[in-house]
Image: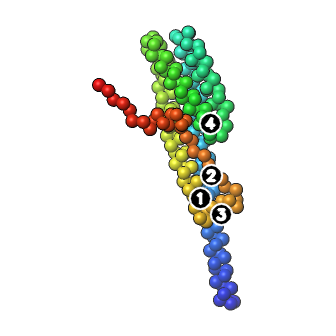
Amino acid sequence: MEPWLIITLIVAGVVVVAAIFIYNNLVNKKVETENSWSQIDVQLKRRHDLIPNLVETVKGYATHERETLEKVIQARNAAVNAHGVAEQAQAENALTGTLKTLFAVTEAYPDLKANENFKGLQEELTATENRISFARQHYNDVVGQYNATLMRFPANILGNMFGFRQVEFFQLDPAEAAAVRQAPQVKF
């Protein structure tokens, strides 16, 4: 065999092996991203399942807070029916806002705050919110790694050839993000 033919075959082999490695890496990162999103989904489902019980418990004590309770249920239903990362994030941010309103309303009902069922549901919801927060953070970390890999050369070429697309981050509502970024005011 000719030396130039051997060198050409070696170079072609290296290119093929590199392409296979890059493709498999993109597949792994895509699957990890999808798995991470499903972990958020699991926690959101848990949250959505807890909310009707919480609303029913509050209803027994705060009968004239009907509008607040209806808003919570509407926000929950919108979150359950949301599709896609952006729509899901928007619906979940709205649901978080209505839950904050609900908990603010419950402050006016000492008997409700002392109710064991309400306290248990509130604790479960708080724990679920923490899990959602961690799942969102993990999802965004994984999405960042996947998107960065997809933008790097030569993965960007192979990614485009095989239809890999960047994935959206799960982001806070712009108004909520601005409030979170502000330093808290401490007054004595």
Residue at horizontal 64%, vertical 37%?
A: 87
Residue at 51 percent of width and 27 percent of height: 125
Whichever of callouts 1 and 4 sits on the residue coming sooner in the sequence is: 4
- Disc 1 marks which residue? 151
Q: Quadrant of residue 51?
A: top right
Asked if residue 92 is positioned above or below residue 53 in the image, the reply reads below
Q: Are marks 1 and 2 in contact (CB under 8 Å)?
A: yes
Q: Locate residue 32, reporting x and y percent.
A: 59, 50
Q: Which of pointers 4 and 3 lies earlier in the amino acid sequence?
A: 4
Q: Quadrant of the image for the N terminus?
A: bottom right
Sequence-wise first label, 3 or 1: 1
Q: Amino acid at mark 4?
A: Gln
- Neighbour class for label 3 at 10 Å: few (<14), some, many (≥20)? few
From this view, report whether residue 82 is shown above or below residue 165.
above
Give, as a three-letter code, the residue at label 1.
Answer: Met
Amino acid at circle 3: Ile
Distance from the alpha carbon under mark 1 to that under mark 4: 25 Å
Return the residue at label 4: 88
Q: Which residue corresponds to mark 2? A: 166
First reached walking from the N terminus: tag 1 or tag 2? 1
x then y, percent, for residue 97: 53, 27
Numbered badge on residue 157 = 3
Quarter of the picture containing the C terminus is top left
Q: Secondary structure at mark 2?
A: loop
Q: Are marks 3 and 2 in contact (CB under 8 Å)?
A: no
Kindly report the distance in space between the C-alpha atoms of the residues bearing marks 3 and 1.
Answer: 9 Å
Mark 1 touching mark 4, by CB under 8 A?
no
100 left or right of 85 in image:
left
- Secondary element type, mark 1: helix
